[in-house]
Amino acid sequence: MSPEYCTIKQIIESGKFPFDEGQWKYLMHNRKKNGLDIAIVKVDRIILIKMDAFREWLENHRERK
């Protein structure tokens, strides 16, 4: 199966993830520090999110009790 790529706008509009535009800006600004850069593909000025890598990143960063 080939990977699915989405823009941040598409992800926000889908409502599948609870992040708003401000939270995405924060995540993107700190992507090297928080490890999200593994899910980012940048082509010129277009930023795409590799969804399988994003889901894995999200799962690895959830709070566990």
Image: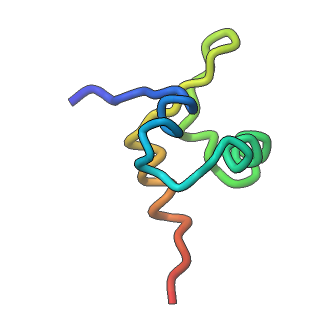
Give the farthest residue toward the left: 1
Q: Is 13 above or below relative to 17?
A: above
Q: Nearer the viewer, residue 64 or 26?
A: 26
Q: Nearer the viewer, residue 29 or 37?
A: 29
Which quadrant holds residue 37? top right
Residue 15 percent across, percent down from the top left: 44, 46
Give the farthest residue toward the top: 44
Residue 14 percent across, percent down from the top left: 42, 39
- What residue is shown at x 52% (from left), y 70% (from top)? 62
- What residue is shown at x 51% (from left), y 32% (from top)? 49
Residue 30 percent across, percent down from the top left: 77, 47
- What residue is shown at x 76% (from left), y 47% (from top)? 26
Q: Is 25 above or below relative to 35?
A: above
In the image: residue 36, left or right of residue 57: right
Residue 28 percent across, percent down from the top left: 71, 40
- What residue is shown at x 54% (from left), y 25% (from top)? 48
Which quadrant holds residue 51? top left
Which quadrant holds residue 1? top left
Give the farthest residue toward the bottom: 65
Tally the numbered discs.
0
In the image: residue 2, left or right of residue 39: left
Q: How is the image coloured?
A: rainbow
